Image (spheres, helix red, strand yellow):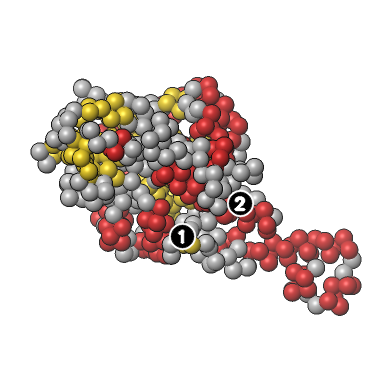
Amino acid sequence: MPICKKYISGSLWKRIPPAFARKIFLFLLILHFSCKEGGYQNQNVFGSSPEYEGEKVPALSNLSIYFFRTVFSPDAREAEVIKRIRLQEIVFRLFDVDLDSENHPVPVASVKFTKEGLQLLKDLGRTQISGLVFITNRTLKNRNPDELQHLSKNIIKKIITVQERNNIYFNDIQIDCDWSLSTKKNYFFLVHQLRNHLNNHKISASATIRLHQIKYFRQTGIPPVERGILMLYNTGDLRNWNTENSILQINTVKKYTDHLDAYPLHLDVALPLFSQTVIFSGGRLTDLISGDISSQLEDRQCFQALTETRYRSVKRCLLKNDAGSEVSVPSTEYLRYETVQRKDFYKLYNIIFNKRNNIRKIYIYEMNQALFKTNLSNDLDRNGEFNQNGSGDGLNREGSAEFYSEVHYENIQMLSELSSFFHSYSSHSGISR
């Protein structure tokens, strides 16, 4: 027992009764791995983490993902990927809170779970199920405490209804709002009420945090929760045609996180892994198409390529978003395709974790149909890991009716990497999640 001999001399070890020695061995085994550099307690520190093109690859136990569609109805391919990735948590956008025509707060865009979706959640077993409620800033304006208390009770009632109707349990509720200085007092009051109600139902409460709320936290304030989720996507100016990529601008992230380590609230992070296309007419944003439509933009009868990511429509054409809905694009419109490259994803991770290495969870924004468009039968080996040798990648090339963009494959590959590193460590050290 070399671990025991590291802490106890050999002669003394021989004199210890076998039954008692086994207990000492188990204790020292836990001590050894908890103190070991790069061990369980230091899993968020890079240590000897793998690299991708010079960027460290994250190795966290808690890889989680957002689901923002209004219907959770995974097909067989999506369900298979979700099972193989071994997610720690799935966060569903339950509903939004906005004002109706009479200026009353009402829930909108409520999520629905199909029978297949609920069965998948049941099959996932230990994966935590959480919810997110988005509250518009205007909902909070000109509200008195009684109105806010009433609103908090209605939100809680709606959350519990979703739980009971679908026979699921929410581990945590993320309260999502880009509050302003004028609504800060009302928002924090509402969050306090929601947290108390949720705790009564044995559900924890957390709050999303934007970059500007990190940089200017002394002015914007700290929401009254125990945990925040730093949303590290949509960091550029979407409406400006000259913006290179509004999803992620590394320089902006650097500028707003100079004092990230001083933020007085535990933070986890949400990192972007999605694509979109922004449409401009006369220099103004006119539409936004979600999902990876890069293959559709290669149609030269419809779109003239100006750069690798910018296009001009030469006639009226139809584009399909990730939900399968068609968007009509008139002639002479300008389009900017945006996505998150693998290296940039890891670079973002490195920037944040070098400044704050006590982050416990990575949330991926977001789970969508485009993320799963890859041939799993070729990409996955018998152990559920993605093949790394470059053969059998399952990608159908251009000209095929089943062409899938390589970014989809890389996205899933990244998710597999993120989830597998800790699992391999856990199985080696005997530590479970």
Q: Quadrant of the rendered structure where residue 351 is? A: bottom left
Q: Relative to 19, is 419 on the left or the right? A: left
Quarter of the figure that contains the N terminus = bottom right
Name the residue at 60% across, 60% down: 40
Name the residue at 40% across, 48% down: 270
Task: Tell me the SS state at disc 2.
Answer: helix
Q: Which mark is residue 52?
A: 1
Considering every residue shown, the one lying at the far front of the view is: 399
Name the residue at 58% across, 54% down: 422
In the image shown, does 78 or 72 lie closer to the viewer? 78
In the image shown, does 35 or 284 lie closer to the viewer? 284
Instruction: Estimate the x, y position of residue 113 in percent, counting from the top left.
Output: 47, 25
Q: Earlier in the sequence, mark 1 or mark 2?
A: 1
Q: Is residue 314 visible?
A: yes
Mark 1 crowd level (few <14, some 14–19, many ≥20, 10 Å Cα): few
Q: Amino acid at mark 2?
A: His
Label total for image: 2
Q: Circle 2 sits on which residue?
A: 423
Q: Is residue 231 visible?
A: no
Instruction: Estimate the x, y position of residue 67 in percent, counting from the top left.
Output: 43, 36
Give the distance between the C-alpha atoms of the residues marked 1 and 2, in whole angstroms: 19 Å
